[in-house]
Image (cartoon, rainbow, N blue to C red):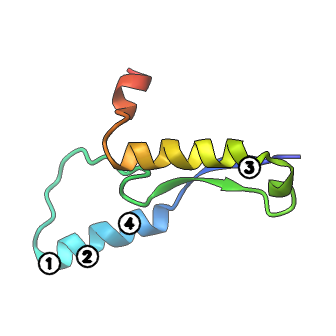
C-alpha cells in the first residue's frame, strides 16, 4: 500500500487568492504555494504510518521545517 503521498490543498490556495481579491491586495503574477505557505504537505496513510520508523518521520519533519525556515531552497532542487 501507499505509505505517504504529497498533497496540495487547492481549496486553501483558492481561498487565499479570494481573500487577497477581497482585501484589494491581489496582484496577477506567478505565486509559489508550497509547504511554507501551508498548501503542500506530505501526508501519511493512517493505516501504514506506524510502519514508518520514527527516525524517518523525524527527518522528514526536519526537512519540512528547514524548507519553511528557508534553509532549503526547493527551487534549487528542481531547477
Instruction: Say what secondary structure mark 3 lies in.
Output: helix
Picture residue at 19% right of the left edge, 72% below the top: 21
Mark 4 Cα shell of 10 Å, populated few (<14), some (14-19), many (≥20) = few
Q: Which residue lies furthest to the front in this view?
A: 55
Q: Nearer the viewer, residue 39 or 52?
A: 52
Residue 54, numbered label: 3
Q: Pointer 3 and pointer 1: residues touching (CB < 8 Å)? A: no
> Viewer-nearest of labels 3 and 2?
3
> Viewer-nearest of labels 4 and 3?
3
Q: Which of 24 and 58 is in front in this view?
A: 58
> Viewer-nearest of labels 3 and 1?
3
Q: Pointer 1 and pointer 4: residues touching (CB < 8 Å)? A: no
Mark before the other along the chain sequence, 3 or 2: 2
Picture residue at 70% right of the left edge, 44% below the top: 55
Q: Is residue 10 left or right of residue 19?
A: right
Mark before the other along the chain sequence, 4 or 3: 4
Judge whether 17 appears above or below 22 on screen.
above
Q: Which residue lies furthest to the top in this view?
A: 79
Picture residue at 20% right of the left edge, 70% below the top: 20
Quadrant of residue 14 within the rendered picture: bottom left
Mark 3 Cα shell of 10 Å, populated few (<14), some (14-19), many (≥20) = few
Residue 19, numbered label: 2
Residue 23, numbered label: 1
Residue 65, numbered label: none
Instruction: Say what secondary structure mark 4 lies in.
Output: helix
Mark before the other along the chain sequence, 4 or 2: 4
Mark before the other along the chain sequence, 3 or 1: 1
Q: Which residue lies furthest to the bottom in this view?
A: 22
Amino acid at each position: 500500500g501507499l505509505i505517504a503521498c504529497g498533497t496540495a490543498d487547492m481549496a486553501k490556495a483558492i481561498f487565499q487568492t479570494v481573500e487577497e481579491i477581497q482585501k484589494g491586495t491581489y496582484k496577477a503574477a506567478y505565486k509559489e504555494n508550497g509547504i511554507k505557505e501551508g498548501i503542500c504537505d506530505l501526508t501519511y496513510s493512517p493505516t501504514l504510518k506506524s510502519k514508518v520508523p520514527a527516525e524517518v518521520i523525524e527527518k522528514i519533519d526536519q526537512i519540512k521545517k528547514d524548507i519553511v525556515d528557508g534553509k532549503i531552497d526547493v527551487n534549487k532542487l528542481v531547477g
